[in-house]
Image (cartoon, helix red, strand yellow):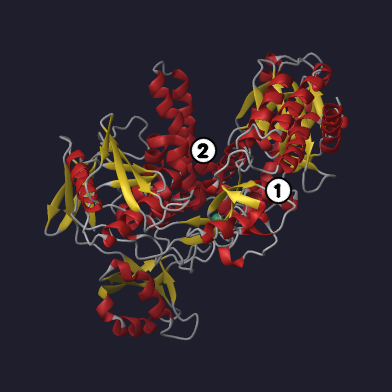
Amino acid sequence: MVVWLKTENGEAVRLTDRWSPSLFVGSNSASDFAVPVHTLRDEFLWTRVVRKRETVTNYGWSDVLEAKLTDARNAQRVAERIERLGPFGTFRIYNVDVPPDQGYLYENDLFPLAFCNVMSDGGRLRWTIEDDVWAYDYAIPTLRTARLDVQVAKKGRLPKPTDQIESFTLEYDGESVAIVGQSETDKLFRLAEVVHEADPDVILTNDGDTFLFPYLIRRTEANSVRLSLDRDGAPLTLPSKPGTSYFSYGQVRYKPTATKLRGRVHIDVDASFTYSEGGFDALFELSRVCRMPLHTSSRASIGKALSSLQFYHALKADLLVPWKPTLAERFKDRNELMTADRGGLIFEQRVGAYEGVGELDFSALYPNIMYRKNISAETVRCSCCPDSDNRVPELGWNTCRQEGLVPRSIRIIVEKRLHYKEIKEKVVDDSLRDHYDARQAALKWLGVTTFGYLGFNNAKFGRIDAHIAVCAWDRKVITDAARVAEASGFVVVHGIVDSLWLWKEGAEKGDYLGLKAKLEAKTGFAMSFEGIYKWVAFLPSKSEPGLPALNRYFGAFEDGRLKVRGIEARRHDTPPAFVVCQKAILDILAEAGTVAEAKARVPECIEVFLRYAGALERHEIPASELTFSTNLSKAPEEYATATVQHAAVKQLVDEGADLHAGERIHYVIMDYLGRGSKRVTPLDMIENQSRYDSDRYVRLLAETCSSVLEPFDPGCAAEGLMARYEARRSRALTS
Ligand SMILES: [Zn+2]
């Protein structure tokens, strides 16, 4: 294992530890162990029999074989060979897919950026940690950051690996250095020189994994040069594994293989949700809490980070991590689950607009239920505590008296976040407040993800009973809260999962705060008061028009703040110009103090629609503001020819783009009713910003505007808005 350290005087130091990970093998008969021990002896440094827990749902211990690997990189291959040594099921294999670097951190109770002392002793490293994952005010070593960009001398419309390098830009220490040269080889050597002089700890790129580094490597090959940008002097080479397409939250996504540098951290900003949403603060907090190296955590889904936290706690409890081929990361998010079984939908609100409604939300309710009610795969209906007092509502299931793996993992997420939120309110220093806020946000994302992992069939420690238990607790909590609210004279206008919208004649902030205290006392869970709406509109579901949508609403608070959920302005696949138009309408509505006032402002809003529609018709809005984006749901060659996605994909592939299922593409509609690949143009290939299918865009804009106008005026459905547009157009044509 190679470990890189930053010393107190800022030096980067490379240390090695003679360490490799272990695999564990279970079998019904210990005599079976002789077979793998003998057959695979070259793969193992040593083997021994140890006592471990094989499944999370069983507290029993068994004798398993621990096999220390000669080479960590062979774990998967060795596991497959062991599996084939007997009839199916003879050997149960564990800890195969715990990444070795994470395993090293767990075993040593280490975490990235931990302040520690280290001694080298006979090839092994001895760690003394003077830091704590629970620490709130921790010192981060001063890290030198550089941003690398490349300009390509494009020959076609898209950059290709065969195109030459025009120049590089390296930004560091507040300066931007342009790297140019006589020949391409010159530029490459100069780049290496500048990087070694700047000696950054972190290199930030945009699309470094999908484009910049693969392109750079192709150019070094074309010029037959060896280029090293890391601290180890290793030449840049293409990753040995191709990227992978996987399922997440019901969508196909694409994960390119990471280009990792030794002794420096490469963060591809476009591949990092955590960094792009929360910067270094969120990334460092997540890496520390989940014990994941920065390269990995910057690219990992939040679910992967949560798994790492669970693996650590499993290891500490001598619980083995079952090995399964990681085929698909398929789990449902909570809204999907709620729709599937209506588990959390209690109050069917009437679609429409309401005024004077206040909103009270339970804070991080799901993780808090799991943590406080001890919900985990092994605790719900455990065999050891049939008489436990902790029982699941409605179902009466017993819950274990011992703390489960999931609550143990969640503890730090829930409690640390709560503390950050508290100290954030007290600090006077704005920059410190921002640090705390980004860190609490990282913990919030982890918390939101915990529920999906609990019921996820393919998760290592998930179980459907635990998932059902959380839903039952949720229903009890929100129903209890609604009853108390009603007993206090409030009307429940709407309630979903963890939010209640309430109304009472003349109720003011103080009344809601009084009610909040009552609800917290009754349920035992903390709430936040979001505010009183001047007006709020709940929308029907788009896919099932008869049913109210769980999370489609928008409203204006008394202080003029807007809260918008689930409509176009919040969605990532909405064309930017549509977002601007919808927000302009919402801003007009936000000035209205009542539903009646909002209704009175509808004509003004229709004018906004007509103005944008006219601009579309005259092609005054540039095409780049009208891009739709979509994740490719399958490999490019699998697309049916009739879809607009296919049309976009075909053009990109024809132009030499290397696309994968799950990659995001952006395109503009050129001729919606046309045939063949000219129906759309990919964003990167647009040459004329004023060519697009304005008829189609006006129609789609009408749908977008109707989402926010129809609740106030039934005549503002998409058809109604189109009729107004047509009427104005024919008037303009005849006059
Ligand atoms: Zn028990």
Mark 2, ligand 1, within 8 Å: the answer is no
Q: Residue visible at 73% across and 26% down?
A: 611
Say which residue label 1 marks: 338
Secondary structure at numbered mark 2: helix
Instruction: Locate residue 113, reporting x and y percent.
Output: 29, 41
Quadrant location of residue 383?
Answer: bottom right
Quarter of the render that holds ligand 1 = bottom right
Q: Residue visible at 50% across and 82% down?
A: 88
Say which residue label 2 marks: 444
Closest to the observer, 205 or 592: 205
Q: Is residue 339 left or right of residue 162?
A: right
Instruction: Locate residue 447, reporting x and y percent.
Output: 53, 42
- If the image is split into quadrants, where does the C terminus sit? top right
Q: Distance between the Cα atoms at labels 1 and 2? A: 20 Å
Q: Is residue 516 above or below residue 688?
A: above
Residue extending farthest left: 122
Q: Is residue 222 left or right of residue 122?
A: right
